[in-house]
Every structure is written in C-alpha cells, then in structure tokens.
Amino acid sequence: KSENDLPEDSTWKVVTYERTPIMSTYLLAFVVGEYDYVEDKDSDGVLVRVYTPVGKKEQGQFALEVAVKTLPFYNKYFQIAYPLPKIDLIAIADFAAGAMENWGLVTYRETALLIDPKNSSSKSKQWVALVVGHELAHQWFGNLVTMEWWTHLWLNEGFASWIEYLCVDYCFPEFDIWTQFVNSDLGRALEMDALHNSHAIEIPVGHPDEVDEIFDAISYSKGASVIRMLHDYVGDESFKKGMNQYLTKFKYKNAVTEDLWESLGKASGKPVLDVMTTWTKQMGYPVVKVSEKQEGSNRVLTLTQEKFCADGVQEKEGSFSWMVPVSISTASDPKKAAVVTLLDKTSMDVTVPNVSPDQWVKVNCESVGVYRVQYSSETLDRFIPAIKNKTLPPRDRLGLQNDLFALARAGMISTVDVLKVVGAFVNEDDYTVWSDLTGNLGQISILLQNTDGFEDFKTFSKKLYKPVAQSLGWDAKESEGPLAAMLRELALTRLGKYGDEETVTEARKRFENHVSGKVPLPADLKGPVYLTVMVNGDETTFNQMMKLYDEADMQEEKVRISRCIGSIKSDELKKKVLDFAMSDKVRSQDTVFVIGGVTGTVQGRELCWQFVQDKWTELHERYKGGFLLSRLVEVSTDNFVTEARAKEVEKFFETHSAPAAERKIQQSVENIRLNAKWMERESTSVLKFLRSQ
C-alpha cells in the first residue's frame, strides 16, 4: 500500500500492506533481500514480476513470458479471474522444495525459475515452464479453494501436477509434453503404487511428520494421473464446467475430495463419485488381462482385472477392485478410441467391430488409464511390426514396453521376452519413448552390474543407441526442436556411459576445447560430455571438472557438474565427492543429489551406504523435517540386490529412527527384495540371451 521512511529515524522503513483476502496461513510469505526484477502486465492487467539475484535479471525473462501467458490461460480455463492485483515469482538461494505457491509471492529454487538464454539446456527451459505452470495453477486450486485437511493434499498437488502439462502444452506445443507425462508422472506413479508399502491417495494424517511423508509420487503423480484419466472420461467441456462450479462454490473456503467429484458428476452426468472413490480410497491399481478371439469381422476381448503387485503376489488382506475407464484402439485408426467402456466388475467381454485377423487391438489407448495391460504372446507379436514402423502411436509404444518391463519385474512374464520386443524399437525416434525405455533398461543394468555379464549388456546397449545417436549427430541442426536436443543428450549419455569408443573420443576432444576456452560447449551437450569424460576419466579430468564447478556462476551449471562428478571410477575420488557434498561449497538443497551421484556402480553404492550410515546423525539433523530425507534413504539403499542387504538396511533404521522417511524405508527394503528375486529368477537366462546377440 505504501512505503515511507520512519519520521524520527530514516534508517528504518515503514511498509503498510493492503488487506489480504480470506486465506490460509500456510500461504503467507514475506521476503526481505536484495534482488533485481523484470516485470510485465498480462492481458488482464495483472502486474507480474520475476525477482532474480542482483545482476541476473535477464535470467528472469523466460519465466516472466511463461507467467504472462499462463495467468490468462487459467483465467479462461476456470472462467474465474486471478483475484489479486499482482503476482511475484522469486528465486531463493537455498530452498528445500522445488517451489512454494504462496499467494501472490511464489518462491522457487533458482533452477526452477532462472534461465540463461545462452547457457540453459532445453530440459531446463521445460522444467521451468512446468514449475511456473504448477505454482500458478495453485493460485486457484489450493489458494482460492483450500483443502480442508492434509488428507486431501492430493487435491492441490495432483491437480496442479496435471494442469501444469495442459498449460505448457498451450504455451509450447513443440515439447509434446503430454507424451512426456506418460513417462514422468504416470510411470512414476505405477512404479511406486505397485509396492505393498504404497498408500492410498487419500490417507488419514494425524502427526505433522506424516504430512512430510505424503509429499510423494502418490499425491503428485498418481493424483495427476487419475485426474488425467477422469478428464478423458468426462470430456474437456464437462470438466471445465465442473471445475468452474467447484471453484465458484468453494472460493475463499475449504473443500474435500467429494466436493470436486460432486461438481464434476453434475456437470458430466457420469457416476464420477463412484468411479473415482475406487481410485482415491484404496491403494494400488489393476492389471487388465486381455484374451481375444476372432468372430467374423469382430474381435471379442475378454478383459479381467486384478490388483497389480510389484512382486506378482496378491495382497493377503482385503479384496481390490476398480471402476476402470477402458478405451480400445485398432490398427485401422490408431489415434482414436474405437470402443470406450467402463470395466466395473472382475471380468467382461467387449466386442471391437471391423478388425481383420492380422490387425492389432490395443487396450488403454494413448496410455490414459491408470492400469497395466497383460496380453498373450500371440497378441504381442501383432504389435511388433507396428512398433518397428511406428504406426503404433508414441504414447502406446511407450505404455506397451513400460507394462512389459513391470510384468517381468513381477515375474509374470520373462525378461528375455521383453528384451526381444526391445529389438523392435530399432527405428524409434521419439524422445519420450527412448527416455522411458532407457529408464527401464537402466534398472536391468543396475542389477546386471552384480554379475560377470555386464559387458554383454553394455554391448547390447551400444548396439541399441548407436543408430539414433548417428542419425542426430553431435551438433544441433538449425531447424530442430527441443526434443531432438533432448534425444541427442540421452543417446550420447548412454553411449558415453557404456564406453562406446567413438563417443568417448569425441567427448574428450570437445571437453578439452571447452576447458581451454577454444570452443565452449552448447548447453544441451554439457550433460553428455561431462558424464562421459567423468565415467571414463582420471584424477586430471576430475580436477578440471572441480575447477569448472568453482568458476560456474549459474546454479544450473553447478547442479549439472555436482551431480555427475560422482560417476568417476576411482574409489578415492568418489570418497572426495562424498565429503565435498557435505561441504559449504554445496547448497544444503543439493547435497542429497551429489551423494546420489556416486551410486552408478556396485562399489559406489557400497561407499554411499557406508557414508550415509557414518554421517547419519548430521544428515538427519539437517533434513529431518522434509522430503529430502526420504530422497536420501532412496538414493543410498534402493539399488541393492540381496536379502542380506535388505535385512541390514532394516536393522540400521531400527536403531536410527527417521519418522518422516518411515514409509520410504519400507519401500526401499521392498525394492531390494524385488531386485534379489529378479536376480535369482532371471539373471542367468538374461545373460544367456545377451551373449547370443
């Protein structure tokens, strides 16, 4: 409202504020400090400012453009104006979360807000756009209408995690962001929610420690995934109408999950409450098993649902069943659902008309549903040519292989059969499909590092990534979009990691030119070059990299370097990295990720786990109230492969309590046991297959 000097002493200022709307106290923020800013007005006249560290205001320009486009987009989508006269976005130097949606003054990590036009990668731009979209969505969903209690946290976070994609798709269609959703959010949710130690989206919260625990992939990613499925089920128009009713009815008030279902049910005329309760009140999700027979020109599918469990063993207690919106597409029109139905019992038959015997039929069109699909091997064979020639659309190619890897991990199918399907991806050119496939192969790579056949896996991988890397080359083409840059980064990183000679030689050459200042690396190549020279590097390389770290002015670059230095081979240098992670050279918000950087090898995981045990008191003291503690538990324990290790981790945490990470500890132990079972069951046959390639 006003800012004046104190009359009797001008070294003090008196600041008077306008009255706030009715709001929750957790959304109030004050920031005092020295900042530069850039500003603009959106098309509705709202003043938008992005505050940056002094001297870096040009790095706020990108976020400003996103915010100025996004506010009117939400205004139009919800049909409700942003209720305040201004919004500020501000970069905080050391910040535990990614960002926080305080009303009208949103705080961010520097890496989630600042973009340097010359030195920021495509991935960073996309990340900033998503986080800005997420936090601005909260101004309506969370701030204007607030959940009644933390049990309904997912309403805030799941919704904002879904609509951030809608907004980025509107601002930057070139990111093809909805395909990336299937990998980054749906994929994460399905992985965590198959564990016996998962939890329902809505979970009773008593103690504040329990609040910290639920800021996880279930509240965010599964929440977002069920909203995406619901949006598809009711249709965009009904969804928008229902959202407007909900926000109008509860503005400046609190709401519970059922209030949203009621508004969306009214707007769509569909049984939203009945359907969605099966997704938010019980944990997990189904696997839909498909058997099929040809009847004349029709294909009759029998769909059967059961709970999908990460170890393939059904829960001992309780019966699980979901109301599953199912969409089915066919080879004759791959991008459109030919049949849409609701699977609301254990089993049902569905007739898909006009399908010839040799054509494929795909359940879960575009991977919108929150479930896995299991086909017979005969049905799977029909997809192979469609994966090879890419007539099966990207989200379906992605979902298909993701389900196969999960079914193999659960022991429901053999991993060798999955690796045979991977061969069909030889012509793949979609970044997101590669990204998901790479994550799944990475999981197998971690397990095979514990065998004598890891070299065979490396050979298999080099063969897989070589064609795509060669087709993209090292240097950006003029007309290429951000996804080409991201795919180049991914393919070169894999080849470098697995020691492909040509890639290593070229990376070293470019690194030397970068260090000497002769030819600086473009932002999109820094990731793969840094990682490649570290994995294949010695002490000299390590020292060069540390020098780059000290000289880096930008947080994005410091993060990029500090997360890859741990991949150096030498144990002595790995220990140095661990000590460096705890030093004052690394921001507290980044320490956990620097520690995690050493876990790329068997020996690195040993060193990391020992280090975390030795330093537990200090680490726990530092992170005890937040999600970084859970992340620390995850990076230091998740990838072990023996029952003995599972017991050791359990035992350690029996005497070193970590209330805010309790569930994560149980999940990690469960993952170790899943790894051990896979090793026992599959490693011999997988190695045999890899040797025969």
Image (cartoon, helix red, strand yellow):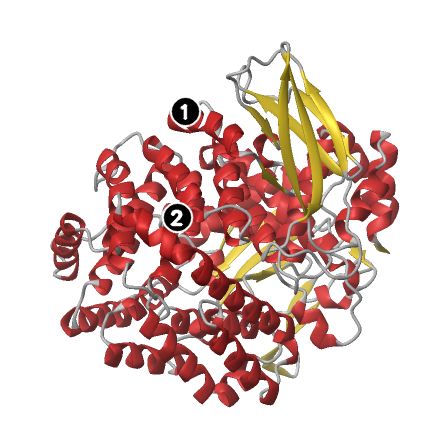
Could you say whether the residue bearing mark 1 is in a helix, strand or loop?
A: helix
Q: At x 84% / y 54%, what residue is drawn?
A: 256
For disc 1, the marked residue is 385
The answer to whether any part of residue 335 appears in the image is yes
Image coordinates for residue 505, horizontal then vertical, percent:
12, 53
What type is the residue that disc 2 sits on? Thr
Q: Nearer the viewer, residue 62 or 607?
A: 607
Say which quadrant the N terminus sits in. bottom right
The answer for how far apart the CA atoms under marks 1 and 2 are is 21 Å
Image coordinates for residue 594, horizontal then vertical, percent:
39, 71
Label 1 vs 2, first from the N-terminus: 1
Could you say whether the residue bearing mark 2 is in a helix, strand or loop?
A: helix
Q: Nearer the viewer, residue 24 or 158?
A: 158
For disc 2, the marked residue is 438
Above or below 648: residue 244? above
Say which quadrant the C terminus sits in. top left
Instruction: Nearest to the eye among marks 1 and 2: give it.
Output: 1
Q: Nearer the viewer, residue 46 or 490?
A: 490
